Amino acid sequence: MNALVTQMQNVRSEQFQCAKLRLHGGEVGVVCVKSLEQGMAFVDAMMGLKAPMEGRVELLGTPLYELPESARLSLLARTCHVGGGLVSNLKVWENLALPALFHDLISAEEVERRLVTAIEQIQNKDEWLQNRLKALPDTLSTYSRRMVGLLRCAIQRPQLIVAEFLLDDLEEGPVDKLVKMLVWLKSQAPDMALLMVHLGPIDAGHLALQNLEATWIIELEEHHHAVSEKH
């Protein structure tokens, strides 16, 4: 079994409770949440942005909330959050390249190579290369902004992708394109872990999630309830 990438133990916040969650390299976990607020609170706790009221959160073998903020941010450079975080006054290509260059992960030449290779996987690749990379994020559709998040993952090649509501509120066509990119990302980095945060029960649509071959699925409850796990 690959190394443990992230885990929660007896975590409780104002929005949710999680008795146990463990995700290893190469695995796909799906966390179903009851509301947008609950999902965002879960991601904040998982990514070291807001400490829960109690419990233990580990990322890449390190207890997140025992670290100073600067060390937490350094650790987060080895993860990629898809679901926001685009700077509105920077062009798409700047949003894609600057995080990797800022953290000195790879060279500018390698950033370009990885980006072009990833865009080759998109059906309308010419539109992306000629227009969308030069656009501001706010001018893009919801689907395109989410694809930008996955392109950023293709550049950074993180150990963990946290995809927040990636497939929610989209038609079947855009969902299939996003899932296709996720499957390609997994093929490029087999040890990468993927954590999907999904709004609603798993059986409420999004059959495309099944193509990701989830290792496990959990449904978060409000903080006064336990978490049930489905296999």
Image (spheres, grey):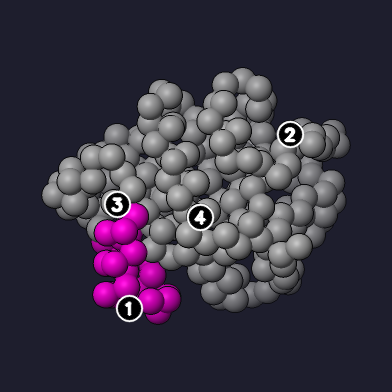
Q: Earlier in the sequence, mark 2 or mark 4?
A: 4
Residue at the extreme front of the image, as rendered:
187
Given this view, does label 1 or label 3 mark the residue nearer the observer? 3
Q: Amino acid at mark 3?
A: Ile
Disc 4 on helix, strand or loop? Answer: helix
Disc 2 on helix, strand or loop? Answer: strand
Magenta segment boundaries in residue numbering? 94-118
Q: Does 54 sit left or right of 33 as displayed?
A: right
* Image point (42%, 76%), residue name: 105
Q: Amino acid at mark 4?
A: Ser
Given this view, does label 2 or label 3 mark the residue nearer the observer? 3
Q: Earlier in the sequence, mark 2 or mark 3?
A: 3
Please tell me whether residue 113 belongs to the stretch shown in magenta: yes
Other residues around mark 3 within 10 Å, as few (<14) / some (14–19) / many (≥20): many
Given this view, does label 2 or label 4 mark the residue nearer the observer? 4
Residue at the extreme left of the image, as rendered:
130
Q: Does 146 sit left or right of 91 as displayed?
A: right
Q: Which residue is tagged 3?
A: 119
Q: Image height check: is 42 above or below 87?
A: above
User: How many numbered discs, if any?
Assistant: 4
Q: Gap between marks 1 and 3, in whole Å?
A: 18 Å
Q: Gap between marks 1 and 2, in whole Å?
A: 40 Å
Q: Gap between marks 2 and 3, in whole Å?
A: 33 Å
Q: Main secondary structure of the magenta part?
A: helix
The quadrant of the picture occupied by the C terminus is top right
Q: Amino acid at mark 1?
A: Ser
Q: Which residue is tagged 1?
A: 107
Q: Which residue is tagged 4?
A: 187
* Image point (47%, 39%), residue name: 179
Q: Does 44 sit left or right of 127 as displayed?
A: right
Please tell me whether residue 63 belongs to the stretch shown in magenta: no
